[in-house]
Amino acid sequence: MKPSDSGTGIANDPRPTVTRRRGLAAIAAMVAGGAVTLTACGGNKSSAAGSGSNAVKSEQSAGAAAAKDTSDASITITPGDNKTNASIQSSGVVTVTKGTLISVSLKTDAGSKVSGTLSTDRTSWKPDAQLQRATKYQVVATAEDGQKRQVVENATFTTVSQANSFIGYFTPDNGTTVGVGMPVSFNFDKAITNKKAVQQAITVTTSTGQEVVGHWFSDTRLDFRPEQYWAAYSTITVKIALDGVEGASGVYGVQSKTVTFKIGRKQVSTADDKTKTMTVVRDGKTIRTIPVSLGAPGTTTYNGIMVMSEKLKQTRMNSQTVGLGKAYDIKDVPHAIRLTTSGTFVHGNYWRPVSIFGHTDTSHGCIGLHDTKGGNDTSTPAYWFYNNSILGDVVIVKNSPDKTVSPDNGFSDWNLSWSAWKAGSAV
């Protein structure tokens, strides 16, 4: 007998022992299942072949039985398992074909559950709100087919981080009514290098069919406007499909929504520094002419087209905020309407005598209208103008000794010719 076949040799090597036990267990299982026919010790070739054939048939039968018990329902989890930089808008969605969903669980890695809604036909489920950025989520979904056979699917994914995503803050807001001069303006929280892809993901349409074109003022600001002012009483629809759009290398959008706003009556007010008056024209008719006081020599008022972007019934105006040193600090300026980011306003003025309006320029670049302290006198021009204006209304200044306002100073977009505007499009 060879040394390797001796009892001592097997005892010193545990691996053959394990192999033998597994072999005996397998034979025992096959005997119990009737898959092997026992013959004389050793058997012959024909009996061995027959025994193997029976084993194969048994395995095939078991496979067929297992297939018969498998559910026809098929679950899909978006964005899939082990995905990173996943969308916060469309991730966590579960769908099923050839079956209906029984249960869906979506929770953060920390265990916080996310609520969701199951479709009426029970073939889809989605979160009730957008997910958090830079968060790991786990999904477990169970479905069954028409024969009540169930299937379970699991997935884990991580949403895009703040460092790897961008957001566009936009105006006007959904559901608002604005004047004919209000552009659709996006300010992105990160610099955009793939401007074409981002611009193509935003579509702006009007109920009157006006052509609308986007213009990039910088890597972070994109505005949309038609050639002429928006048509009065029209409806504007903005479709934002930035979710998953790569705005810069490795930086993706996370927004997907549709915004609708309305254009009100057409009101354009023209302040003429030559006549010291402001003429208010609504829907083609002059409704009021107001005496004004524009910028004094050295602090003149910009010429050009400006758009109302903010209304403040009362506000503090401090010259230091606009680089004019300690020239003034008025804590209760009434009826202030912002025209530029740099600080041009139409506002009430109670600290100057009424006699200067329509005759003398005394402001530091704003358009001043007679008012009273507190702004509660309904008979003053400033009170009337404030209450008869909406955001997006147009104010034009002409015949001032100053330059034309820069198109990107506030919503002064209309100072660019149509050809110059279209030249700033990335599409």
Image (spheres, rainbow, N blue to C red):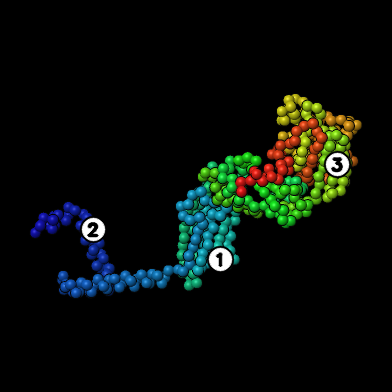
Residue identified by numbered label 2: 18
Q: Indicate whether 401 appears above or below 234.
A: above
**First in residue order: circle 1 vs circle 2:** 2
Q: Residue at x 16, y 70 (%)?
A: 42
Q: Nearer the viewer, residue 183 or 37?
A: 183
Identity of the residue furthest to the left in this view: 1
**First in residue order: circle 2 vs circle 3:** 2
| Label 1 with label 2: CB-CB less than 8 Å | no
SS at mark 1 in the image: loop
* Label 3 Cα crowd, 10 Å radius (few <14 / some 14-19 / many 20+): some
Residue identified by numbered label 1: 122
What's under tag 2, amino acid-wise?
Val
* Residue 24 locus on image (x, y percent): 23, 64
Query: Could you say which quadrant of the image residue 39 lies in?
Result: bottom left
Q: Residue at x 59, y 45 (%)?
A: 195
SS at mark 2 in the image: helix
Q: Residues under labels 1 and 3: Cα distance?
A: 62 Å
Q: Residue at x 25, y 64 (%)?
A: 25
What's under tag 1, amino acid-wise?
Arg
